[in-house]
């Protein structure tokens, strides 16, 4: 863990704006588990976006929850849906096959996912400049993505927002300053968010390591320690997991 960044985030946690419009006094928050321990999940379910979306929506409805959340440092089976998550393979736009479902090797999730309907608004928790943005349009990738750069006290760090709406990129400019609490974007539909059920992937990144418009949101088990050191717990900003 990057203790300097972690400490400054903890120190300032009460000053961060909610990334989504979650009100702990009235909104129920559901925790979702996408590890192999969740026996409700099948390869067929996660490979079909409509079926997977129905699963998410049914969980939200049954739990009377406005949002579902979770996933940091979670060893997930979700990434068996696409060859995009093979550690040594090139990105692929193809639909999953039995071979690449079994061959996926990146499985450790480096962000927190917030699940809610498409169009859900995303706000900036702390003022910052647009570092970069892109449409990462591989199958099961981020889709529309925005990365912000922040400075808090003397510490520079980044936040990544994945699976947004393509409309959110239209007027985006690198170097543009976006204020705390300003509307940044919206949860995208499957056709623009990497073909996932609508959700936000939120990630904190210390060093972008020359990446532009993209940064790994999933790593291999062998790289877990290295990536978690560079990507501390997003709940240091979200401050939502306590309500699950």
Image: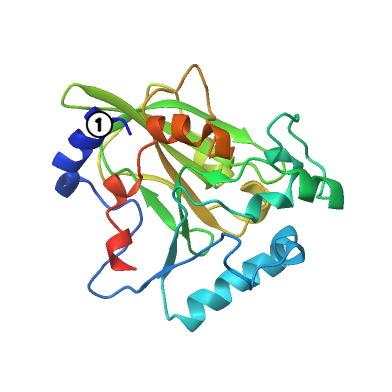
Residue 152 falls in which quadrant of the image? top left
From this viewpoint, is residue 219 visible? no
Q: Residue at (50%, 58%) from the top-left corner? A: 119
In this orientation, does residue 180 appear?
yes
> Which quadrant holds residue 166?
top right
Give me the residue at 56% from left, 61% from top.
Answer: 34
Color encoding of the figure: rainbow
Which residue shows up at 51% across the image and 43% down it? 162
Q: Quadrant of the C terminus?
A: bottom left
Image: 222 above or below 165: above
**Circle 1 sits in a helix, a strand or a loop, which is it?**
helix
Q: Horizontally, is 107 left or right of 158 in the view?
A: right
Question: Quick one: 19 or 119, which is closer to the camera?
Answer: 19
Position in image of residue 117 (x %, y %)? 52, 64
Would residue 20 be found to the left or right of residue 171 on screen? left
Indicate the position of residue 156 as horizontal and vertical percent values.
Answer: 28, 23
Q: Which residue has dot 1 on it?
A: 3
Residue 30 lies, in percent from the top left, at 42, 70
Q: Please name whichever residue, 105 or 147, is drawn nearer the observer in this view of the structure.
A: 105
Q: Quadrant of the N terminus?
A: top left
Which of 180 and 40 lies nearest the eye of the viewer?
40
Q: Is residue 190 left or right of residue 174?
A: right
Q: Position of residue 184 (x, y in %)?
A: 39, 43
Alpha-carbon neighbours of circle 1 within 10 Å: few (<14), some, or many (≥20)?
few
Above or below 78: residue 90: above
In the rendered image, the vertical position of residue 190 relative to residue 5, given as above or below: below
């Amino acid at each position: 863990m990057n203790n300097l960044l972690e400490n400054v985030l903890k120190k300032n946690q009460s000053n961060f704006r909610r990334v989504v419009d979650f009100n702990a006094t009235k909104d129920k928050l559901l925790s979702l588990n996408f590890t192999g321990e969740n026996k409700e999940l099948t390869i067929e379910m996660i490979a079909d976006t409509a079926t997977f979306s129905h699963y998410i929506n049914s969980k939200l409805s049954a739990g009377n929850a406005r949002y579902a959340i979770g996933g940091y440092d979670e060893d997930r089976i979700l990434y068996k849906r696409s060859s995009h998550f093979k550690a040594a393979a090139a990105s692929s736009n193809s639909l999953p096959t039995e071979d690449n479902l079994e061959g996926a090797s990146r499985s450790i999730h480096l962000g927190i996912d917030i699940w809610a309907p498409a169009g859900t608004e995303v706000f900036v928790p702390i003022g910052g400049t647009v570092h970069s943005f892109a449409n990462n349009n591989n199958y099961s990738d981020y889709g529309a993505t925005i990365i912000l750069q922040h400075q808090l006290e003397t510490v520079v760090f980044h936040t990544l927002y994945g699976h947004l709406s393509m409309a959110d990129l239209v007027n985006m400019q690198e170097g543009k300053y976006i204020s705390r609490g300003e509307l940044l974007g919206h949860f995208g539909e499957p056709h623009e968010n990497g073909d996932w059920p609508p959700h936000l992937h939120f990630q904190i990144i210390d060093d972008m390591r020359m990446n532009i418009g993209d940064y790994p949101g999933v790593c291999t088990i062998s790289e877990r320690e290295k990536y978690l050191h560079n990507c501390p717990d997003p709940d240091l900003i979200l401050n939502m997991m306590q309500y699950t």
